[in-house]
Structure formats: C-alpha cells, structure tokens
C-alpha cells in the first residue's frame, strides 16, 4: 500500500456542533489510494508544539482528490485544527493502516459510536455503491447526546440504507446505546458487522457477533506517535497471547483476533 506526504490545502471548514468539526482537504494522492477504515497522520502545528502528528480516521474521500476529517476539539492538537482557516495548508501523511475488508455478497450492519461514526461514512458510501440488494443493510449511529449524532445523519441518509440512531440521554433517536438497537434487529444469518467506537462498545459487538456466529470487524482507536509501527506505542493484546500494532496490523481487526476483558 502506497503512502504519501502531502501539503493539503483546507478548502472547506464546517463547525458541525459545539466541539465537532469537519474539514475538507485537497490531497489527491492520498484520496486516490485510500480505503475505508484507513487513517492519516496530520501535523497540526507549524512548529514543535505539538511535536507529534495526530492520527485521524478518513471520514470520506472524493474522486476529485479530496479527503475529509471529522474530529472533536478535545486537546492541543485538535484545538489548533479547530481554529484553522480555509486556504491554510496542513502536512498530511497517509493513507495508513489496514482498512475494512468489505464482503460484497453479505448484508452489512455498520455500527458507529461517538467519534467512531466518522469512518462509517466512507464505508457506507462504498457499500451503497455495490451492485446488490441493500434491503438487509443497516446503519446504527449513537453518541452521548444529540450533537454527537444529528450533524451527520443527512450525510448517511443520502445512501438510502436503513438508519437507526441512539443517544445516552435520549435527545436524538432512542434513549440507550447502539448495542440496544443491534440486539433488537433481526439480522440476516450471514450479516457482516462493521464497527468503530469506544472499546466497551466494540467488546459488546464482539460478544454479540460471537454468540450469533457472525463475522465482525472493528476499527480500534489508539493514541500513536508515528503511525508506521516504529514507536510501539499503539499495542493491543491479541487473542493468541501476543500483541498487535493498531497502526500497521489495524486499525481494523476481526474481533476474534483481539483479546477482550471478558
């Protein structure tokens, strides 16, 4: 897989809610080789503060050579990006990691929680373009409150797949968790589950899929310094007692390859 370092121009900036931001960048080399589930490393400052690049999942790409990043302003690096302006340049490296392995002939169930919603849009776009019946495909999105979910709902609706939402406080969709919706659905026996979100959500997806003998792939979130396996800072335990690197072995894993708490 080819990686590219590009000086990417910001061509659109969207403040989707109080802390949630989406930026569109001109990065034709990265856009041309990216797969759903991969990520990029972005240098967020012009100097050495912050020193390290930050990882961001690819929210979407376009045939016109654009990539989108969706993030929450929660720290030094993201705060700098949240105050960037259209026309500014960002140093972007990618695409990195292993993306989703899409099963063309299986119904798909996409589950995104919190910021884990971001890479699901890229995946939904690809799945919706497959030349097959989509009547059994399903998207489930959730977050703590309305502002975590509602800003992206119309983007997902454009693909015409069944969509359900949940929030912890009940301000959008049902009151509860994405896994509550998942348990209430009658999934086809060969459904492929794809997920991204908090670790506890991913563990429930693993338990659910295992109990129903369904295949499940999840994108794991991790802090990392390099994105290429050199720093060894993004290790996760594997099911065979060893460890895996999120940046090069993932971020997408089959849930059976990971060790879970229970």
Image (cartoon, helix red, strand yellow):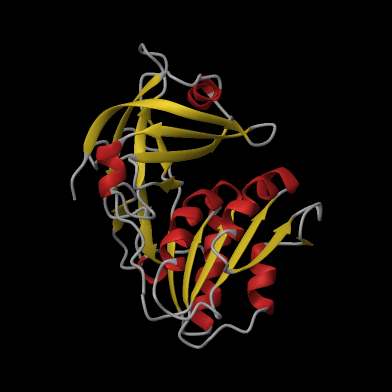
Q: Give the x, y percent position of residue 90.
A: 37, 23
> Where is residue 128 drawn, in percent x and y?
46, 67
Q: Residue at x 52, y 66 (%)?
A: 110
The answer to whether 250 appears left or right of 228 in the picture is right
Q: Which residue lies at the image location 28% right of the left edge and 41% below the top edge?
A: 30
Which image quarter: residue 29? top left
In-front residue for pair 99/212: 99
Lateral position of residue 253 relative to residue 141, left or right: left
- Looking at the image, the residue that sits furthest to the top is 47
Going 45% across and 40% down the picture, which residue do you hit?
A: 68
Q: Position of residue 199 (x, y in %)?
A: 53, 55
Q: Where is 18 relative to 255, above or below?
A: above
Nearest the eye: 92 or 243: 92
Q: How many marks?
A: 0
Q: Nearer the viewer, residue 195 or 62?
A: 62
Q: Looking at the picture, does residue 23 appear above or below residue 198?
A: above
């Amino acid at each position: 897989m080819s990686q590219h370092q590009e000086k990417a121009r910001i061509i659109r900036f969207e403040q989707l809610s109080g802390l949630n931001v989406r930026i569109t960048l001109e990065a034709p080399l990265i856009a041309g080789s990216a797969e759903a589930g991969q990520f990029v490393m972005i240098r967020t400052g012009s100097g050495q503060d912050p020193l390290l690049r930050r990882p961001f999942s690819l929210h979407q790409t376009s045939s016109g050579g654009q990539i989108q990043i969706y993030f929450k302003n929660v720290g030094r690096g993201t705060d700098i990006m949240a105050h960037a302006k259209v026309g500014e340049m960002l140093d972007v490296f990618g695409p990195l990691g292993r993306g989703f392995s899409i099963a063309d002939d299986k119904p798909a169930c996409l589950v995104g929680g919190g910021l884990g919603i971001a890479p699901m849009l890229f995946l939904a776009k690809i799945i919706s373009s497959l030349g097959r019946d989509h009547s059994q495909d399903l998207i489930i999105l959730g977050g703590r409150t309305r502002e975590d979910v509602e800003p992206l709902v119309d983007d997902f609706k454009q693909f015409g797949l069944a969509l359900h939402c949940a929030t912890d406080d009940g301000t959008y969709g049902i009151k509860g968790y994405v896994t509550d919706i998942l348990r209430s659905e009658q999934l086809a026996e060969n459904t492929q589950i794809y997920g991204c979100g908090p670790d506890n959500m991913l563990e429930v997806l693993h338990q659910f899929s295992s109990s129903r003998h369904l295949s499940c792939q999840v994108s794991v979130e991790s802090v990392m310094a390099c994105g290429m396996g050199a720093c060894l800072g993004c290790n996760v335990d594997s099911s065979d007692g060893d460890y895996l690197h999120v940046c090069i072995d993932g971020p997408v894993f089959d849930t059976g390859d990971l060790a879970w708490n229970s």
